[in-house]
Amino acid sequence: MARKIGFIGLGIMGSHMAANLVRAGYDVSGYDVVPASVEKLLQAGGKPAPTIAEAVAGAEVVITMLPDSPQVAEVVLGAGGVLESAPAGLLLIDMSSIAPETSLEVARVGAEHGVQVLDAPVSGGEQGAIKASLSIMVGGEADVFETARPIFEDLGRTIVHVGGHGAGQTVKAANQLMVAGIISLVSEAIVLLEASGVDGERGLEVLAGGLAGNRILDLKASTMLGREFAPGFRIDLHHKDMGIALSAARAAGVALPVTGLVAQLVSAARAMGHGSLDHSALLKVVEELSGR
Ligand code: NAD
């Protein structure tokens, strides 16, 4: 019989990741508060679980892919949560992007229940989830990481153990501050080009081949130029990640001035009502600041 994985959180990312695990031969039992998301797993060949307890029952591994720290705390530590029904020896892999201190708390309480925990947030977006080409940054014990490596290889391409519990989340925070900063600068380049009467498409094409070339330009230049902002990665989630980055900076006693400024642009995007759009909608904020 195929080994069972419980998968909790079947949204934009989790639905594709769970489907990849079904394809890899695992018996995947999935739970989400939104019934339609569970339906997608059924179509992919997985089994819907009506409760967290049923997703966990008989599983060797449970993966969570939830929006933010409060949901992970509730699903793992709360009443009716993963730890309540976890068999000793269970491996819990949280792949959500959350605060490092929540990952530390989950690992600490998990250990009290005999559950091993890894924090393993990802980068690569929905396309990376679909193509199983995610970058996966893993915090936790090295031998537990090695046990989980075959599962990570079914989900991603660049898989690195970056340190102890919470370290995966710190690396993810660094990823998110860079991504928001790069989107902001690509937005400023677009506004400058267009306001100066230069064709945006040609301008960005040549920029992509030089030192300013980057993956945001490769993946998002054409949708940004066409003002298509369907998510992808929602501004609301990036707002959460900028908060994580700034509080991690405070905890580490370092100053991240550019991140502070970019975080304000992300807050402005939300305040302007763009929270459910893709994070490339930062372009709308830069345009608004220029009266365009
Ligand atoms: P999403 O909102 O599409 O999916 C989250 C899912 O969790 C939803 O289906 C929601 O119904 C479910 N959920 C919420 N609370 C729940 C609960 N208490 N119990 C069970 N299910 C619950 O978000 P997403 O875009 O898939 O992102 C998930 C995580 O991955 C986030 O932390 C995000 O920051 C991170 N991430 C997203 C992307 C991306 O491009 N979308 C890329 C990398 C990392």
Image: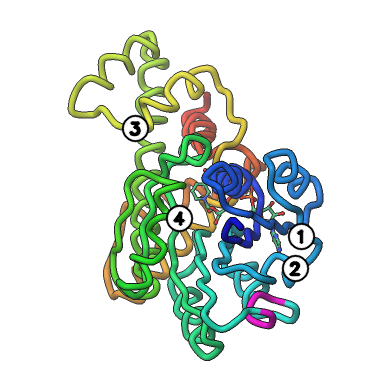
Residue behind mark 2: 54
Q: Earlier in the sequence, mark 2 or mark 1?
A: 1
Q: Is residue 243 above or below residue 107?
A: above
In the rendered structure, the answer to whether residue 15 lies left or right of residue 34 reads left
Q: Is residue 7 left or right of residue 125?
A: right
Mostly what secondary structure, the magenta segment?
A: helix
Among the two numbered marks 2 and 4 on one chain, the one whose residue lies closer to the N terminus: 2
Q: Residue at x 65, y 67 (%)?
A: 71
**Residue hosting label 1:** 49
Check mark 4 vs ligand 1: CB closer than 8 Å? yes or no. Answer: no
Q: CA distance from mark 1 to mark 4?
A: 20 Å
Residue at (53% x, 36% y) in the render: 130
Instruction: Give how far across and how far down residue 274 sits, in percent.
Output: 63, 40
The three-letter amino acid code for the residue at tag 1 is Ala
Marks 3/2: CA–CA distance: 40 Å
How many residues crowd mark 4 within 10 Å: few (<14), some (14–19), many (20+)? some
Q: Position of residue 19 (x, y in %)?
A: 60, 43
